[in-house]
Amino acid sequence: MNKARLWTKDFLIVGFVNFFIAINFYLLMVVISSFAMESFQSPPGEAGLASGIFVIGALIARLFSGKWMERIGRKKMLHGGLISSLAMTLIYFGINGVPLLLVVRFLHGAAFGIATTALATIVTNIIPKGRYGEGLGYFMLSVTLAMAVGPFLGMFISRHGNFNMIFVVCTISAAFSQASALFLSVPEIVLTRKQLEATKGFNFRSFVEFGAIPISIVCGIIYFCYSSVLSFLTVYIKEIHLADAASFFFVIYALAVLFSRPYTGRLFDSKGENIAMYPAILIFMIGMIILGQARAGYTLLLAGALIGLGCGAVQSVSQAVAVKMASPHRVGLATSTFFIFMDGGVGVGPFVLGLLVPFTGYRGLYSSMAIVAFACTFLYYILHGKRAAPGRAENISAN
């Protein structure tokens, strides 16, 4: 029996849009702490807040995006988020203090949250049924590539240029994301009267998909750990004198995810989530241990490869599970619920972990995150793994 076609025009375009908006996010994420410290003499905790408040803005925006998306329309939601993201990126050129930086970062994060929630919902209707694991895995490769290109450009430009050059690249990326979206055909969902009524009001179920919460909690904690890499790697590698090798850290990270994603998606579709999730968490943990003990360039890059393998697999499997636990008209809510928890981990992490750095140091911070990741294997079993059906992933659906 032939599989339904995955690589359509719209699938490719939605990947391009996702790539360009993610470039903007990851490029700024790895340099904004340094920008705050160098430009405004911010302490690590305040610099971490400047980094993480972006994701807090995205989290809040996702909370309302999932609720209102089908009423407003996916296409309008997408273009509204992309245009707002471009506008916020332009404002970075005029930032003259920490208060304005925090406001712009929050609003930029909100625009990012609206756009990416719309994209992640749109792609679930483009991917053929029965190929969610594979399709979402390939879709998230756009983010994986951005994870490599964005931080690499950020670190390279910060060493050889200035922050205004970084803002120029981010502006170009935001413009490309909007231009690419113009060619995207967006499928809309027509809601019944009962479904429309369910989106009204402010009850908890109108904001989140309950079935997606358990797996989202696990992914959120893993990304809380990963936020220590995004926010403080630039400072850490200067401290341990491995700046040259660190330029390629996220490239190796991305190559590892690129290698693993197709296999992870097919494994999820054919064998279920447990067979992919437990090894992914443990590989991520080992990567964090090696990162905390790195004293040579090759060990730093090995850590990047293992963190990429583990973190990438956790993200793609968790998102696929969250989507499959929702009925079709609540896929938008399931998607926003998943990203709320993931963004929450990345958003809270830089501020909380920035406060810990003076006590643990950067090596101690990464070792501590390895312990937290290990604890997630037990948390995953309790929240989801013990109830996950063996065999094909379709068996987990609550539809």
Image: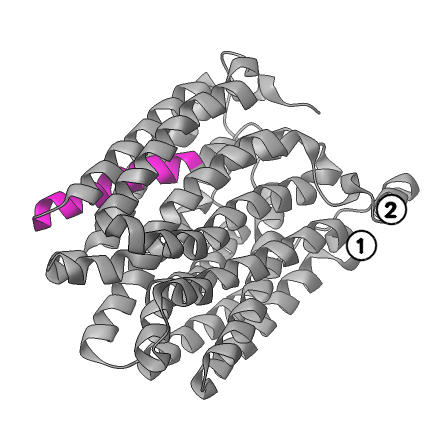
- In this rendering, the answer to whether 342 lies above or below 269 is below
> Which residue, as the protein is rendered here, is positioned at the far top?
390
Tag 1 near tag 2, CB within 8 Å: yes
Q: Which residue is mark 1?
A: 71
Tag 2: residue type?
Leu
Residue 369 appearing in the image: yes
Q: Is residue 248 left or right of residue 265?
A: left
Where residue 22 sits: x, y (%)? 44, 60
Marks 1 and 2, how far apart at CA:
7 Å
- Image disc number at residue 245: none
At 44% from the left and 77% from the top, the residue drawn is 171
Where residue 105 sits: x, y (%)? 51, 70
- Magenta range is 296-314
Which SS class for mark 1? helix
- Image disc number at residue 196: 2
- In this rendering, the answer to whether 18 lies above or below 195 is below
Where residue 131 sits: x, y (%)? 52, 31
